[in-house]
Image: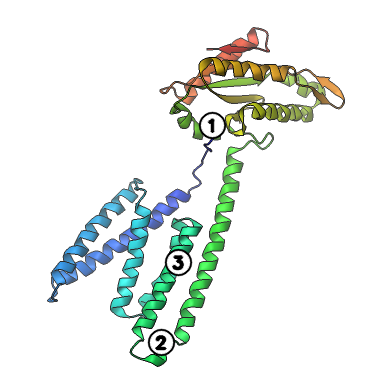
Amino acid sequence: MSANKPEIDLGNHHLKNKVLLTLSMMILCSCLVTGFHNIFSDGRFAHWVAASQISMAIFFAYTSLRLLKNRAKPWFNWTVVYAYIALIAFAVVIFGVHQSVSMWFFSVPVVSYFIFSRRHGFVISLCVLALFIYLQINYNLGEPNKVWNSSLINIVLPYSVIMALANAYEKVRIQNEWELSEFALTDALTKCYNRLALKSLYPTLQSAQRHTALMLIDIDHFKRINDCYGHEAGDQVLKALSKVFIGVLGEKQVFRIGGEEFLLVLEGDSEACKSLAEVIRNKVQHMNFHYNGEALNITLSGGYKAISPDAELTDILKVVDEALYKAKSQGRNTVVYV
């Protein structure tokens, strides 16, 4: 559990799928057009080439269908992007580097940086630039005065600018995505994870090999603290308690899911989890908390329930909430185990 981090879909995954779908359909259409052309061609190996192109068309029809249904395979990224690059290179070889089709090479950095990581995108973009330069030089080998000319500069410089912009954009996008994710998953006051983060992580908790339990906590007489000392005092209490919980469990096992309610994830065997719950309750009870020079006695009540593999989050939250209510009715400063 401690190694996991909650995730939230900010739409980037769906956008990547749309880009892959567009590329896949482009390759599909290209293979169909050239394949049917070769079927009726009189070239020596035309029928063999046509058969391979129709086979590729069938394959990319499959990838397009999977992408349309949001059922992409992990290897689709590699296959579609590399096939896209191969298609551009093939067209350049057939029509020549001086034709407008070669301009498609300039789209590679944008596509590769977006689909893959920055490092992977950089490597692919650099390799494609080297390929582009090679094709340019090889095309002009028959005319030595044209091998090294201004056209190479007009390839390298714009391509490098696009690479740099794609790299900078991807860096900013990743940072913004991380900040948005943290904002969406973190409680602004205590910096603990929130209810949305809990929903994201709960399937991982269910599938954990070791015994895991949830403890719902409510601060006793919290409304009285707010009424007597002000909301600033209440905020300071919440911050202090979150530090206690994180100190015992770690930041990835503490969730603030309501006003004065926290949900704690306890790991270990049954007795160890219950012992940990009592350690937390005792730490809070004996916590030395002062506000404006006045000591405040803070206690908590809790409801505890072990997670079962088939239990839904809403169901287990209902159970621990009922246990918490029993703890309150039993005089507070206690944990009820279900």
* Label 3 environment density (alpha carbons within 10 Å; few <14, some 14–19, many ≥20): many
In primary-sequence order, the first of circles 3 and 2 is 3
State the residue at coordinates (86%, 27%). Answer: 292
In primary-sequence order, the first of circles 1 and 2 is 2
Which residue is the site of mark 2?
Answer: 147
As displayed, is residue 169 above or below residue 5?
Answer: below
- The answer for how far apart the CA atoms under marks 1 and 2 are is 61 Å
Which residue is the site of mark 3?
Answer: 125
Q: Secondary structure at mark 1?
A: helix
Place residue 182 in its image quadrant.
Answer: top right
Q: Residue 121: x, y in percent? A: 46, 61
- The answer for how far apart the CA atoms under marks 3 and 1 are is 39 Å
Disc 2 residue type (three-letter): Val
As displayed, is residue 233 above or below residue 178?
Answer: above
Place residue 310 in its image quadrant.
Answer: top left
Q: Secondary structure at mark 2?
A: helix
Numbered circle sitting on residue 198: 1
Q: Residue 307: x, y in percent? A: 48, 21
Disc 3 residue type (three-letter): Ser
Disc 1 residue type (three-letter): Leu
User: Does any portion of residue 98 appear in the rendered image?
Assistant: no
State the residue at coordinates (68%, 33%). Answer: 190
Please indicate whether residue 310 sits to the left or right of residue 304 in the image.
Answer: left
State the residue at coordinates (12%, 76%). Answer: 42
